[in-house]
Every structure is written in C-alpha cells, then in structure tokens.
Image: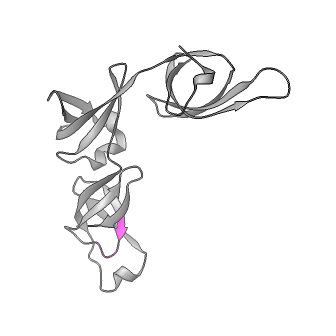
Amino acid sequence: MISTSDFRNGLNILVDGEPYQITWFQNHKPGKGGAIMRVKLRHLKKGGNIERTFKSGEKFETLSVSRQKKQFLYKEGDNFNFMDMNTYEQLSVSLEFLGKMANYLKESTEVEAIYLENELIGMELPIIIEMTIAETEHGIKGDSVSNLTKMAKLETGADIRVPLFIKKGDKIKVDTRNGEYVERM
C-alpha cells in the first residue's frame, strides 16, 4: 500500500478497481480543511486520461508493470506473431489489439510488450522507424524548394504524407506516435 504523500510520476496504482499510471500530481492546501492531492491519471488498459482529487493520507495498492522485448516475425490473417527476445517463445496478437501500430510493423521490428501483473496490456514501437516507399506519384524538378506534400504508400501498406521530392524506393524515417514523415535517409 502507498499513501498520497508517496505519489510520483510514472507510479502505477489501483483506483476504484482499475489500473492507472500517475502522469501529473500536485499537493494543494486550501485555506480550510486538510490538504488534497490533485492527480492526472492514465488508464493502463484503455489509455484514457482522467483527473481526480484525493484526501491527504489516502492509501492505494501499487501495481507491478513489466516490459519485455519482442520481435515481430510475421502476419497470419488478422494475427501478428512476435517472438520473445529472451525465451524465444512466440506470442500471437490480434490486429484489434495493436490498432494503428500495425501500420508500422515489418519483419524483425523490435517492440516492447507491456505486462500488468503478467497480463499483456500493450505494446510500444520505437518512436522513429525506417520504412521504404512502395508507391507514390512522380515529383517534378524543383519540388525540393516548397513544403507541399503528397500521398505515399509504405512497404507495410500504410498511407503517409511525404514531401514532393520523395520517390518510390526511397527510405524514410517515420514518427510512429503520429504517423508523420521525419526525414529521408
């Protein structure tokens, strides 16, 4: 058990039977009464954010969250298969579980699997990933001067906006958090 006085960013706690991570907190002492703790929490399974206030001295159960390196092997239907980098065990994860992250998975991509009390609750890609342009319209001479963009298809089939000078076969860096072009390699 942990008290509100022990709160820190990144701490995982159980609030009303649900797992949350503290993303921000502030101790507030109003003119009257006892101190309160204002807290912003991120739900570990659903990903949503909430704001709550707790009385000073309230106690919460801490949760253990662990991370394991996995390597993407192959896609089979709507399932994505990963291999644990330490034990070589395979794990199959659905497209629904991965969401938009599936747009940036190519063979041998390393990800971090996040476990809450030995239950898989999420996966994280590297922030920047290298991809190859599979299809795009041809640019014209002088396109590198402007900041206009065009649509391109990545090797995984995902669509992305890229500058006009990018052509088929170019290797680029993509930010996996927002799916935006970073730079050409």
Extreme-left residue of the structure:
88
Quadrant (top left/top right/bottom left/bottom right) for the C terminus: bottom left
Please indicate whether residue 180 sits to the left or right of residue 77 in the image: right
> Is any part of residue 78 visible from this angle?
no
Please indicate whether residue 70 sits to the left or right of residue 160 in the image: left
Which span of residues is magenta-colored?
Answer: 161-166
Q: Position of residue 142 (x, y in %)?
A: 34, 86
Q: Position of residue 128 (x, y in %)?
A: 33, 53
Magenta residue check for 46:
no
Return the residue nearer the eye: 5 or 11: 5
Q: Residue at x 42, y 74 (%)?
A: 148
- The answer to which quarter of the image holds residue 16 is top right
Q: Position of residue 70 (x, y in %)?
A: 23, 35
Q: Residue at x 30, y 64 (%)?
A: 152
Magenta residue check for 164:
yes
Please indicate whether residue 24 sits to the left or right of residue 96 in the image: right
Q: Is residue 111 above or below residue 147?
A: above
- The answer to which quarter of the image holds residue 159 is bottom left
Q: Residue at x 62, y 22 (%)?
A: 4
Q: Position of residue 52 (x, y in %)?
A: 65, 28
